[in-house]
Every structure is written in C-alpha cells, then in structure tokens.
Amino acid sequence: MELIKWWMLAGFLGIVLFMVVSRSVIKPLRWMWRGVMYSVIGGVVLLVVNWIGTFFGFTIAINPITATITGALGLPGLAYLLAVQFFLI
C-alpha cells in the first residue's frame, strides 16, 4: 500500500515538473487565480449585502459556493441567491 502512494506522488511530481519545464502551466494557473479572485470578490459582496441585510432582516450564508456564484455571475448571481433565500428557504 505504501508503494502505491509513493508512485502516485512520483507521478504527480513528474507531471508538475513537465508542466513547469514546458511552460504550459501558466494558462491553467491564470484560470485558477481568476477563479479564486472571483470567489474572494463574491465573498466581499456577500459580506456587504449581509451587513446591509441585517437592517432589513435577511442574510445569505457565505460559503465557497455562494461566493463563487456571486463572484462569477455578478448581479444576476446575487439576485438568484436572494430569490432562493426569499422563496425557497
């Protein structure tokens, strides 16, 4: 069993090394960075909406899924989350 883990780690590191040497890693890393940034921006927007929403008696849970929806879709994503919050929950 320990041998399988060793070979999996060696294979993974080999793939990463190949991606670094061939410089094909830049585009996937750029996409991952954008995804992380959209999620962070979505989380900040949800934080502001929750802060304002406490005055009106509603909040939206802040988790990676809702932050990604808000960050990636923008205002339509936020409207979707608000509609789900009001009508389904």
Image: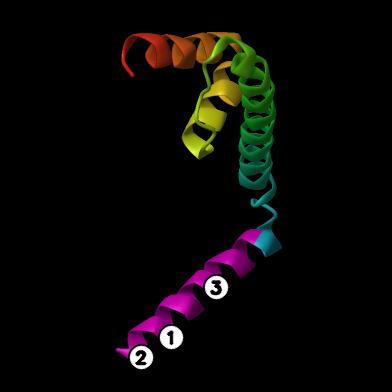
At mark 3, the secondary structure is helix
Provide residue 61's location: percent of width, then percent of height: 50, 30
Q: Amino acid at mark 2?
A: Glu
For residue 38, above or below residue 10 = above
Q: Assess whether mark 1 and mark 3 are in contact (beta carbons under 8 angstroms).
A: no
At mark 1, the secondary structure is helix
Residue displayed at 34% across by 84% down: 4
Q: Which is more toward the observer, 24 or 43?
A: 43
Q: Amino acid at mark 1?
A: Trp
Q: Which residue is mark 1?
A: 6
Provide residue 2's location: percent of width, then percent of height: 36, 91
For residue 53, above or below residue 66 = above
Q: Which residue is mark 2?
A: 2
Where the N terminus falls, by quadrant? bottom left
Between marks 2 and 3, how big is the CA–CA gap? 18 Å
Q: Which is more toward the observer, 56 or 89?
A: 56
